[in-house]
Amino acid sequence: MTGLSPEQRFQNHKQGIKAARIVKRCGERLVPRLYAHLNPMSFPKAKAMEIFLAESLRKRGYVVYGGH
């Protein structure tokens, strides 16, 4: 969770700035339709939603790292 936009955070990952290795190595693009309706969100709400959303994406066939 971050105060940065999803686009900026993805660019940081790709550039190696506070990056998750899997995103740096395998990340291709963002899918805004999966998250646009969720932004902006307060930190407490984001923390509560993280597990639910990760599991929901996994059930739909997406590979999700984290979500804890």
Image (cartoon, rainbow, N blue to C red):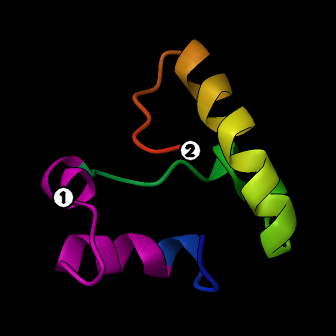
State the image coordinates of residue 66 (x, y, percent, origin top left).
45, 45
**Residue 60 shows in this picture:** no
The residue wearing badge 1 is 21
Q: Nearer the viewer, residue 16 or 43?
A: 43
Mark 1, other Cα within 10 Å: few <14 / some 14–19 / many ≥20: few
Which residue in the rendered view is the most extreme toward the left?
A: 25
Mark 2, other Cα within 10 Å: few <14 / some 14–19 / many ≥20: few
In magenta segment, residue 56:
no
Say what secondary structure mark 1 lies in. Answer: helix
Comes first in the chain, label 1 or label 2? 1
**Range shown magenta:** 8-26
Q: Give residue 59's quadrant in the image.
A: top right
Which residue is located at x 62 percent, y 26 percent? 55
In the image, taking residue 51 as reference, residue 49 lies left or right, namely right
In the image, taking residue 47 as reference, residue 57 lies left or right, namely left
State the image coordinates of residue 4 (x, y, percent, origin top left).
58, 85
3 shown above or below 46? below
